Image (cartoon, coloured by chain):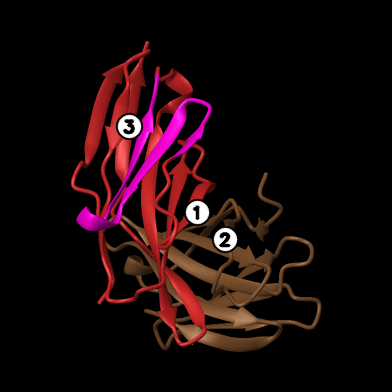
Amino acid sequence: AQKVTQAQTEISVVEKEDVTLDCVYETRDTTYYLFWYKQPPSGELVFLIRRNSFDEQNEISGRYSWNFQKSTSSFNFTITASQVVDSAVYFCALSEALGRIRKLVFGTGTRLLVSP
Amino acid sequence: DSGVTQTPKHLITATGQRVTLRCSPRSGDLSVYWYQQSLDQGLQFLIQYYNGEERAKGNILERFSAQQFPDLHSELNLSSLELGDSALYFCASSAGQGSTDTQYFGPGTRLTVL
């Protein structure tokens, strides 16, 4: 069965520090998608990135970057020069095939606290 | 703002009652998904509808039901409520049936059962 593990329950950093959130996944599918979502204190889930299993290129978007390594089944997320507004719970998710249908399997989330 | 709307934002009710949560997907999206987020279970997929038809079922209790209407909005009905049903309920939408699509989430409905 598909599974997503986010071993870090909570991380605390000081503003401007770099921080990496780990995500390890398990799947028997050869085609799958990986996602990161952010849940700020206000509660909504904000989409950050989608990655398919055939694209192992790292991606950078401003202060955010993602490192996808199929060999270690990991899809880690790095925030460079963290800011207080980055404080949130971050979820990694895996899309699971049910025939033609895919549902999201979420990790338990990592709470990031950025202090000034 | 994801474009997915959910009402109400908060709901407080008593055990044994029935409530209806409403979701409007992003313009043009045909799929609607329901998720439950609780402290002990995390984020759990409940059910998916595509263009009015049920497409996939997850950990949805028999006391819960959902439907998607011709205008594509969806409702999640929760009945015989128990204390353990207190949670944040999210609706998400995607353009297609989900095989390659990103799911965009609404702001959630926080249900408190007293």
Which residue is disc 3 drawn over? A112
**SS class, disc 3:** strand
Identify the amino acid type marked 1.
Arg
Disc 1/disc 2 C-alpha distance (Å)? 7 Å
Q: Where is the C terminus of chain B found, in terms of image quarters?
A: bottom left
In the figure, residue B6 lies in which quadrant?
A: bottom right
Task: Return the disc, 1 or 3, that comes first in the chain's sequence.
Answer: 1
Q: CA distance from mark 1 to mark 3?
A: 20 Å
Residue, disc 1: A50
User: Label 2: few (<14), some or many (≥20) within 10 Å?
Assistant: many
> Quick check: can you spot residue A25?
yes
| Tag nearer the camera, 1 or 3 | 1
Which colour is chain B painted? brown
Query: What residue is drawn where x is 32% and y is 67%?
Result: B84
**Chain letter for the residue marked with disc 2 in the picture:** B
| Colour of chain A in the image | red
Image depth: mark 3 or mark 2 in front: 2
Q: Residue at x 39, y 22 (%)?
A: A80
**Please, what is the dominant secondary structure of the magenta stretch?**
strand
Q: Nearer the viewer, mark 1 or mark 2?
A: 1
Give the amino acid type for the residue marked by disc 3 in the picture: Leu
The subunit letter for the residue under badge 1 reads A
Q: Are the residues at dot 1 and dot 3 in contact (C-beta closer than 8 Å)?
A: no
Which residue lies at the image location 24% right of the left edge and 30% below the top edge? Answer: A11
| Residue B111 x/y as whole percent | 48, 60
Residue A98 is situated, as x and y percent measured from the top left of the image, at 43, 84
Residue designated by label 2: B102
Residue bounds of the magenta highlight: A59-80
| Quadrant location, the N terminus of chain B | top right
Q: Few, some or many C-alpha atoms within 10 Å of disc 3 (few <14, some 14-19, many ≥20)?
A: many
The residue lying toward the viewer, choosing from B6 and A53, is A53
Q: Is residue B77 magenta?
A: no
